Image (cartoon, grey):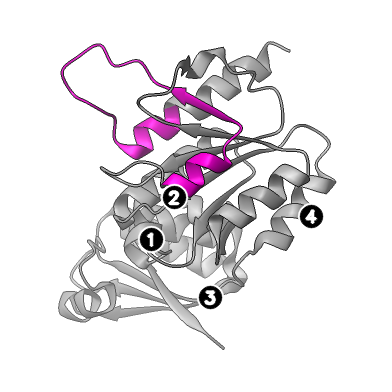
Amino acid sequence: MKESQVFGFHVVEVLLGRSPERVLRILLDRERRDRRVHHIRDLAAAQGLAVEPTTSAALDRLAGDGRHQGVVAVVRATAEADLNSLLRLVDAKGSPALLLALDGVQDPRNLGACLRTAEAAGADAVMLPRHGAAGLTAVARKAASGAAELLPVARVGNLVQALGRLRDAGLWIVGAADDASGRYDEYDWTTPTVTVLGAEGGGLRRLTRERCDWLVRIPMAGGVPSLNVSVAAGVLLYEAVRQREHT
């Protein structure tokens, strides 16, 4: 059985509330006795899970570079979603699907923030390339504030081919590009859509860009040339929310 670690109060609380069967162990900083620690203990006790007191140094080793806040959960690793599971999800959905695809986002904190935004906006899933991009590390999961435990995340070997198969399944592929002629709010987001965002700094790769049916831009009135990828995800996905609420 594969195991992984998640850390931070909010993520562990989400797991205990939504997927307690995945939690194998919970380790808490034995020096902490505040309200949030007691809340974790209460949630764990309600699920019949024991809490192991340990040192902050031991938690540091488990969390690596991440800020664990005094709590680490050892969990059963979830089975990774794939393109076929996304296609089944799209096929079974009664309303137009809304997916987010990330073309090579490198920073795990940016990835986590994108997942948090996508889950909050009601996106159905997120798709990532398997190579050359940040994966679902503990740091990304913490930045996602629980969204990584709630939202299907599929990693694919070839993002361009995967976008082609989603197009064949009836979804429109919409990429964000600074030099696009059309604004993001001119697209009809009520249709089944895959929103594609490029990597930090470089944007969409050429082949990914060519696979898109539409390219849209977010107008920039200030001197900053572009938005952080998670902020751009929020702008686009919440435009979809706005339009869909008015149909």
Quadrant for the C terminus, please: top right
Residue 154 in view (yes/no):
yes
Kind of element beneath mark 4? helix
Q: Amino acid at mark 3?
A: Ala
Tell me the distance, in whole angstroms, between the alpha carbons under discs 3 and 1: 20 Å
Please say if 81 is above or below 223.
below
Can you give x and y, in whole percent of width and height, for residue 180 in the image?
43, 23
Compute the Cα span from label 1 to label 4: 25 Å
Residue located at (19% from left, 79% from top): 55
Mark 1 sits on what residue?
133
| Residue kind at label 4, given as amino acid type | Arg
In magenta, the rendered stretch is: 206-234
Instruction: Tell me whether the residue at label 3 lies in contact with that at label 1, contact meaning CB atoms closer than 8 angstroms.
Output: no
Pointer 3 or 1: first along the chain: 3
Inter-mark Cα distance, 3 to 2:
24 Å
Q: Which residue is mark 4?
A: 88
